[in-house]
Image (cartoon, rainbow, N blue to C red):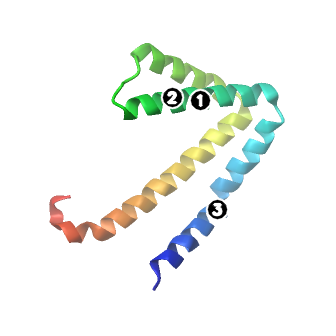
Amino acid sequence: MNIYDKAHDLAKALKESKEVEEITSAMKLIETDPEAKKMLDDFRERQMEAQQRMMSGDMPAQEEMEKMEKMFEVLSLNLNIRRLFDAERRLSVIIEDVNKIIADSLQHLYGSSM
């Protein structure tokens, strides 16, 4: 059994998943709505900046986090953006589950302390 072949099989399965199809479809619809696209792009940019700051140990202020939550709520009123967010959330759960399955399969290497 070649682990890399299995990884490529998994990548192919993810690419062909319903969640990725829905993300692609929602993105195409958002691309046709300039206002929605701009709002989503602005949100993603702010989200990335906040994540980078957090990774460097600089936690955003509470009011900044609340502002991001409000932006998310407003964006979610757009059906195509909500559809995108829902599909992204489902794909994220799948990826987390796969990571857990892999980590659990190796847990015996380090004893039961993990």
- The three-letter amino acid code for the residue at tag 2 is Glu
Given this view, does label 3 or label 1 mark the residue nearer the observer?
A: 1
Instruction: Quickly name the residue at label 1.
Output: 45
- The three-letter amino acid code for the residue at tag 3 is Lys
Secondary structure beneath disc 2? helix
> What number of labels is visible?
3
Instruction: Quickly name the residue at label 2.
Output: 49
Of labels 3 and 1, earlier in sequence is 3
Secondary structure beneath disc 3? helix
Examine the rendered structure and indicate whether residue 72 appears above or below residue 105.
Answer: above
For the C terminus, the quadrant is bottom left
| Location of residue 33 (image quadrant) | top right
Mark 3 → mark 1, Cα distance in angstroms: 25 Å
- Residue 98 location (% of width, % of height): 45, 62
Residue located farthest toward the bottom when viewing the structure as drawn: 1
Neighbourhood count class around disc 1 (C-alpha, 10 Å): few under 14, some 14–19, many 20 upward: few
- Residue 46 location (% of width, % of height): 56, 26
Instruction: Quickly name the residue at label 3.
Output: 15
Secondary structure beneath disc 1? helix
Along the horizontal axis of the image, is 26 left or right of 108?
A: right
Neighbourhood count class around disc 3 (C-alpha, 10 Å): few under 14, some 14–19, many 20 upward: few
Neighbourhood count class around disc 2 (C-alpha, 10 Å): few under 14, some 14–19, many 20 upward: few
| Location of residue 99 (image quadrant) | bottom left
